[in-house]
Amino acid sequence: MAEPKAPSIFAKAVNAAWVRPVLLLVLIVVIWDLTIRLFQIPAYQIPAPADVVAVLLSDWPELLRQSWPTTYATLCGFLLSAAFGIPVAMLIAGSKTVESYVYPLLVFSQSVPKVAIAPLFVVWFGFGIIPKVISAFLLGFFPVVVSAVQGFKSVDPDMVDLARAMQGSRLQVFRAVNLPHALPAIFSGLKVSVTLAVVGAVVGEFVGSNSGIGYVLQRSIGTFDLPTMFAALVILALLGVVLFWIVDRVERLIIPWHVSHREDIVFTA
């Protein structure tokens, strides 16, 4: 029986997590360009990929400067979502009474379009950063709560009873049993939350702002500058990917034992 061989450098490169998405992205761009050429779609409807790349290269300093307010509002809203969402989830999961009062209100709040209430934040808090942070917080809060509640409720009661039988205090039981078992679900909610926080920040910038990627989008739509609009969308997509990757890295550092982070071992005869 042949001993298993370590995968080659080429196999490692092909199996890298970033290679396949990049290849798919390149394929989408090629199809995009070919579609425009074959069907002769005018530039005022869909810009060519080369035009978008040209805008990214020429206006990169301006786009980078405009991305900072959006990033700041996104991070503030996301951190607030985590800071308030996880404790609220703990209360909901630990008390049927709190769940009966609070959970339906949270679900009801998600049926209200954030674009509809975002102008109220401008009226109440002005045109500064606060309305954008609140908008990002509102979109990112619900996924954190739902995922965390599911995580805390999925803890095996027998393990909790065992920890209590070993004279563990409530805090010790929570740190040793409840929290570790809920962390995978919590991080799943945080990953969704950080991407939605980007959307929330842009919604806030749409309503009232003179800076940010949302402002660039609104300005380019008003002037029918589609290459700039697509370039701004690319910046938003990159921002969401980077923030998602950061949360994923943090998850791998905190819960490296979870099954979702165990790397596959490739064996070749």
Image (cartoon, helix red, strand yellow):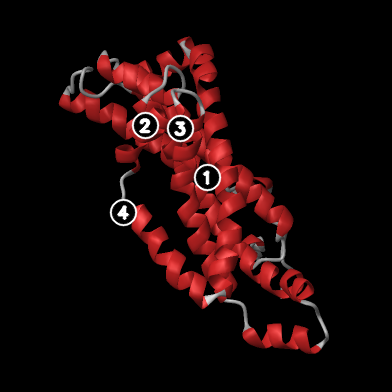
Q: Position of residue 76 (x, y in %)?
A: 58, 37
Mark 1–mark 4 distance (CA, rounded to whole Å): 20 Å
Labels 3 & 1 near each other (Cβ < 8 A) = no
Q: Residue furthest right?
A: 167
Q: Secondary structure at mark 3?
A: helix
Label at residue 178: none
Labels 3 & 2 near each other (Cβ < 8 A) = no
Label at residue 111: 4
**Label 1 vs label 2, nearer the camera:** 1
Mark 4–mark 2 distance (CA, rounded to whole Å): 35 Å
Which of 63/222 is in front?
Answer: 222
Location of residue 43 by image quarter: top left
> In the image, what residue occupies the spot 42% across and 59% down?
106
Residue 169, placed above or below residue 25: below
Q: Secondary structure at mark 2?
A: helix
| Residue at which label 1 appears | 194
How many residues crowd around disc 4 within 10 Å: few (fewer than 14), some, or many (20 or more)? few
Q: Position of residue 155 (x, y in %)?
A: 61, 77
- Callout 1, which amino acid? Val
The numbered mark, 1 or 4, whose residue comes first in the sequence reads 4
